Image (spheres, grey):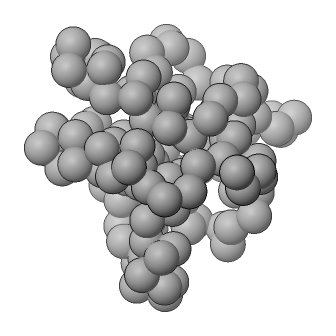
Amino acid sequence: MKYQVITIAVLAALGSAAPGLAQPVQTPAAAQEIGYESGALGYAALVEGNYSDALAQMQAAEKQVSTAARRDPARLINMALAYAKLGDIAAARSHYEAAIASPVSFDVILSDGRVMNSRIAARTALQRLDRGYAKR
């Protein structure tokens, strides 16, 4: 199994009330995506609640990567969260399912600092989506 640790912003999708940061920084905007170009995962925008900006950042970054990189679970999970928060539940579900089915999985650092396997994070977020928590 490929093992790497990255930061993703699935906190809201996992149902926590207040955003936490996976790194010791003072503001969400100061957070950085580990192992990715800044903005590639829309992390800061997601944590700040700017879901349209986050989605636009990730879609722009997606055009710059290979087909295989487009199946990156961290990218898929964060895109799913943005879609869910924007009310596109079908697109959110599709992206979570793609993250679960991705040929790779790895540990990710959630925005509250917890470490979780990407497949488990996607499954957990999908379950919450099914229960209607995405719009809270």
Q: Is residue 14 visible?
A: yes
Instruction: Tell me where residue 92 sits by quadrant.
Output: top left
At x 43%, y 15%, the residue is 15
Q: As displayed, is residue 51 above or below residue 131? A: below
> In the picture provided, is 17 more to the left or to the right than 24?
left
Return the x and y of residue 8 as percentages of the image width and height: 60, 44
Q: Position of residue 45 (x, y in %)?
A: 50, 50
Placement of 80 over or under 24, stated as above or below: below
For the C terminus, the quadrant is: top left
63 w.r.t. 95: above or below: below
Of the pair 5 and 135, the residue shown nearer to us: 5
Q: Nearer the viewer, residue 24 or 121?
A: 121
Image position, residue 3 (x, y; %): 76, 51
Res 109 → quadrant: top right
At x 75%, y 34%, the residue is: 22
Q: Judge left or right: residue 68 versus residue 36.
A: left
In the rendered structure, the answer to whether residue 88 lies left or right of residue 102 reads left
Name the residue at 65% across, 29% down: 116
81 vs 124, nearest the viewer: 124
Viewer-proximal residue among 69 and 40: 69
How many marks the image carries: the answer is 0
Vertical placement of 37 versus 5: above or below?
A: below
Furthest-front residue in this view: 1
Quadrant location of residue 93? Answer: top left
Which residue does the image show at 50% across and 53% down from the upper left? 73
Residue 83 visible in this rendered orientation of the protein: no
> Picture coordinates of residue 48 (x, y %)?
51, 39
Q: Is residue 103 left or right of residue 94?
A: right
